[in-house]
Amino acid sequence: MERKTIRRNCWNEAGKAGIAFGLISTAYMFLVQAVGSSGMNAIIANIITFALWGLKFGGCIWLMMVAMKKFAKDHPGATNSDTFRFGMCTGLLSALIFSAASFANVAFISADMYAAQMEAAIQSYAQLMDSNTLAVVEKWIGRMPQITFFSNLFYCTAYGIVLSAILSRNIPGRDPFADYKPDQQ
């Protein structure tokens, strides 16, 4: 019965953690977009963007570790595979939230900005492409929101799985003497 409770609670708690991670990544996306379109010096904008990326990267690793430790603490019978499953579920759910937000950003919120960037890129490389290549690129631009959604979903889920695999090896901590039985003489 305890195993079923852990598995059921895994999805519930992963949903809460996934929302937090998805919102952090979405906030990062919009902050970087705001810094890029602010018109400030490019060097300063790059430094700010790099600092934001470092905070998001390190913060998400730390928060995932904290969430996995809390899950293991709340479920005393949890094993390393249970915490791995919790991390995988968290990664998948946060990837869904971030991918949906990035889809909405490319398709609706900042569609004009992305269209202008793509048009500028096409114009700068138009002399290097023949008409068939230009037609394919323009076709792909029309599918940019879907490409953004699925590429982010795949990348963020894979990142969550790898991070969960690394962190779950020591969560919960293992007692090397748990099975030790002294000789009875």
Image (cartoon, rainbow, N blue to C red):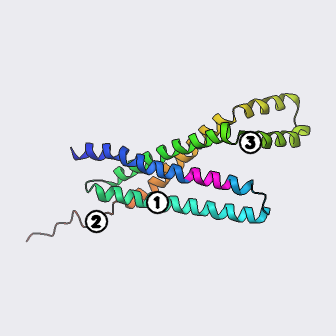
Point out the image quarter for the C terminus: bottom left
Which residue is the site of mark 2? 175
Q: Is residue 16 above or below residue 151?
A: below
Front disc: 1 or 2: 1
Residue 131 on the magenta segment = no
Nearer-the-camera pick, 39 or 25: 39
Residue 29 on the magenta segment = yes
Point out the image quarter for the N terminus: top left
Three-letter amino acid code of the residue under disc 3: Tyr
Three-letter amino acid code of the residue under disc 2: Asp
Q: Alpha-carbon neighbours of circle 3 within 10 Å: few (<14), some, or many (≥20)?
A: some
Q: Is residue 57 above or below residue 94?
A: below
Quarter of the image for residue 43 reads: bottom right
Q: Residue at x 63, y 51 (%)?
A: 29
Which residue is the site of mark 1? 63
Front disc: 2 or 3: 3
Task: Name the secondary structure under disc 1.
Answer: helix
Which numbered disc flags the more N-terminal residue, 2 or 3? Answer: 3
The Cα–Cα distance between marks 1 and 2, rounded to whole angstroms, is 24 Å
The Cα–Cα distance between marks 3 and 1, rounded to whole angstroms, is 31 Å
Residue 2 locus on image (x, y percent): 22, 47
Q: Residue at x 64, y 65 (%)?
A: 51
Which numbered disc flags the more N-terminal residue, 1 or 2? Answer: 1
Nearer-the-camera pick, 12 or 157: 12
| Residue 114 - label | 3
Magenta residue span: 25-32
